[in-house]
Image (cartoon, rainbow, N blue to C red):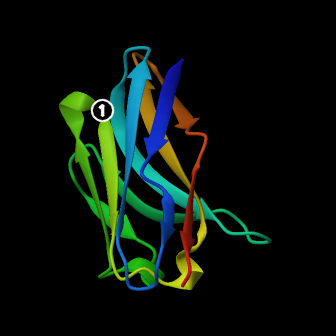
Amino acid sequence: QVQLVESGGGLVQPEGSLRLSCAASGRTFTMIAMAWFRQAPGKQRELVARITNGGRTSYVDSVKGRFTISRDNPKNTVALQMNSLKPEDTAIYYCQLTALHTDEVSDYWGQGTQVTVSS
């Protein structure tokens, strides 16, 4: 198994910034992609940002220009820099890993970290 540990959530005022981090450890794997999802109360979980092993990134339209996803492949970590935060960014943020183990692909999830944007 692979464990994902997230950090960096918290309470921030509108227009503020936060940086989320996620570290993967455990069973040997090759990262295919890592991503951040979020789920607000009463809403479905949505993909926020994704980065592939080759560095290709994608974002949901609502965060383009404000959020940046990055990764450190040797350390198996991914970060999400969130700037110009808005109240509608309030949610639990989850780290997700798509990993290759020899001949099988598996998805792993972190426990989630709360981000609250409020004055």
Quarter of the view holding residue 70: bottom left
Side (left or right) of 51 relative to 96: left
Residue beneath disc 1: 76
Q: Residue at x 47, y 42 (%)?
A: 6
> Where residue 91 sits: x, y (%)?
61, 66
Q: Residue at x 35, y 80 (%)?
A: 64
> Where residue 88 sits: x, y (%)?
58, 82
> Where residue 47 sits: x, y (%)?
53, 63
Side (left or right) of 40 relative to 75: right
Q: Residue at x 56, y 83 (%)?
A: 87
Give the class, few, some or many, for how many residues have Cα within 10 Å of label 1's Cα (few <14, many ≥20). Answer: some
**Up-down: is 46 above or below 35?**
below
Q: Compare residues 8 and 99 and report the one nearer the observer.
A: 8
> Where residue 48 sits: x, y (%)?
48, 66
**Up-down: is 75 above or below 111?**
above
Instruction: Report helix, strand or loop for mark 1.
Output: loop
Quarter of the view holding residue 20: bottom left
Quadrant (top left, top right, bottom left, bottom right) of the C terminus: bottom right
**Up-down: is 33 above or below 14?**
above
Identity of the residue furthest to the right in this view:
42
Quadrant (top left, top right, bottom left, bottom right) of the N terminus: top right
**What kind of residue is marked 1?**
Asn
Q: Residue at x 48, y 56 (%)?
A: 9
Q: How many marks?
A: 1
Q: Compare residues 52 and 12 and report the one nearer the observer.
A: 12
